[in-house]
Every structure is written in structure tokens, then in C-alpha cells.
């Protein structure tokens, strides 16, 4: 089975400052890794994903994440945040084979302060 | 990207009534859909895997007689909350992959907020 730990439940940051949202995972098999964003009362939107290849993946809205297999981490970063980035961010993992569901972390609430 | 649509987005019902939530894949066929439940300020909990033409697979602790899932076609899965009670109030989200997808990505519906009075 897979599991995901998001180390910070809330991250406040000033506008235009950099941010890192941490994610660690556990799995006995190879996995795919994802970051999703959720705005209030909405579904989830994919920010980026790691399937294979380059460990640094770039996503939408200026976000990027780096897969570190030895540390079983997939931290999300953005060099300069905007007010509009205020939202809930979920890290997720799935097996890299079969039509299997995603397992989500508990989420990190990013609050960007003007 | 692929589009998954849910209806209704919000529903309020009286305790004891049943509520049906629809999940449609608009531009692709989905043999499998996943239903999640999200409690306030908490993560998404997988409730069940909906399989077209066969019975759904429920996660441990999810009452299958309470949460009826029907996946009658390749583009529609429904979740019926039977005899709803206030503790069933939650945000329900469905998701699916495009068939044979090697991308691993799940596409999510907009969610349905159920409030049971």
C-alpha cells in the first residue's frame, strides 16, 4: 500500500516570496506522484506530475517539484507566490501500473499574505 | 484535458431521504471511476471504485448499502446516499482516467456538497 505525508498543514507566506510545500511518500512498489490544487468548494486541478524521467518536473502556474527517490520526497516549490495561489494543495501517489486510485496526503493550506 | 462533470454541485436534503449524485466523463470513456469523500479541512478519502457493468469495490469501513454506486455506462457513474443523516454531510468528488492512460493522472469532477438537515 502507498501513503503520503504532507508535513505542514498550513503555510503562510508573503506575496512574491518563495514557498516550498513538503511531501513524503511510502510505497513498496514504483509509483507516480502528483500535486493537485483545490480552491474553495471546487474539485481538484492537476498542478504537475512525475511519471518517469527527469526528476525535476514543471507544472502550471509557475510551480515545480523534484522527485527524490532516496528521500522518498516530492516537494512542491514556487519562486514567487501570488495572492491567487492561496488554496489547498494535495500531494498524491499511485502505483505506476493498473487503473488504481490516488492516495492523498492530508493537504497543505497555502495562505499568501499581501 | 479530459473533463469530468458532477451534478448537482450542491444539494440540501432532509434526514431520511435519499440523494443521487451523477458523475459524467464528457469527452472520454471511463471503465473505472473513483468516488472520494472529503470532510471539512481534511483530505480526500477513497470510498469506492466504480466499474462499468459490474459491482463497485468499496473501501474498508464504507457501507455499501448506504452508498449505492451504479456505473451503467462508460460515461456515467452515480452515487446514491440512501436514508441520509447529518453525519453524511460532506463534499463528494468523483474522478476518472482516460482509458488505457499511461499518464496516471486522475481527472476530477467539480464536487458535490451534500448537506443533510
Image (spheres, helix red, strand yellow):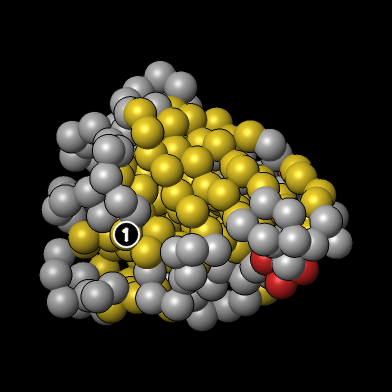
Residue B14 is situated, as x and y percent measured from the top left of the image, at 83, 56
Left or right: B7 as drawn, with respect to A25: right
Q: Nearer the viewer, residue B93 or B107?
A: B93
Quarter that holds the C terminus of chain A: bottom right
Q: Which subunit holds the residue at mark 1?
A: B
Residue at (73, 67) in percent of width and height: B85
Q: Nearer the viewer, residue A10 or B21?
A: B21
Residue at (54, 72) in percent of width and height: A106
Mark yes or no: residue A14 visible.
no
Q: Nearer the viewer, residue B18 or A104?
A: B18
Disc 1 crowd, CA 10 A, few/some/many (<14, 14-19, 20+): some
Picture quadrant of residue B11 = top right
Residue B2 is situated, as x and y percent measured from the top left of the image, at 41, 27
Residue at (40, 19) in percent of width and height: B27
Judging by the rendered image, the residue that carries numbered circle 1 is B57
Quarter that holds the N terminus of chain A: bottom left
Picture quadrant of residue A25 = bottom left
Amino acid at each position: 500500500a502507498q501513503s503520503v505525508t504532507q508535513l505542514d498543514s498550513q503555510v503562510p507566506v508573503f506575496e512574491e516570496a518563495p514557498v516550498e510545500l513538503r511531501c513524503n511518500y511510502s510505497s513498496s512498489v514504483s509509483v507516480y506522484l502528483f500535486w493537485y490544487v483545490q480552491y474553495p468548494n471546487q474539485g481538484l486541478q492537476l498542478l504537475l506530475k512525475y511519471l518517469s524521467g527527469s526528476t525535476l518536473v514543471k507544472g502550471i502556474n509557475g510551480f515545480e517539484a523534484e522527485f527524490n527517490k532516496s528521500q522518498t520526497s516530492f516537494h512542491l516549490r514556487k519562486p514567487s507566490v501570488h495572492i491567487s495561489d492561496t488554496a489547498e494543495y494535495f500531494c498524491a501517489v499511485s502505483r505506476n501500473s493498473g487503473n488504481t486510485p490516488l492516495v492523498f496526503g492530508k493537504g497543505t493550506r497555502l495562505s499568501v499574505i499581501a | 484535458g479530459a473533463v469530468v462533470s458532477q451534478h448537482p454541485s450542491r444539494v440540501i436534503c432532509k434526514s431520511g431521504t435519499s440523494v443521487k449524485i451523477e458523475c459524467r466523463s464528457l469527452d472520454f470513456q471511463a471503465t473505472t471511476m473513483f468516488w472520494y469523500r472529503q470532510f471539512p479541512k481534511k483530505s480526500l478519502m477513497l470510498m469506492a471504485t466504480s466499474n462499468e457493468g459490474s459491482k463497485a469495490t468499496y473501501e474498508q469501513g464504507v457501507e455499501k448499502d448506504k452508498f449505492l454506486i451504479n456505473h451503467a455506462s462508460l460515461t456515467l457513474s452515480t452515487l446514491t446516499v440512501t436514508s441520509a443523516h447529518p453525519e453524511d454531510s460532506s463534499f463528494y468528488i468523483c474522478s476518472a482516467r482516460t482509458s488505457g492512460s499511461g499518464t496516471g493522472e486522475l481527472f476530477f469532477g467539480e464536487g458535490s456538497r451534500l448537506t443533510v438537515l
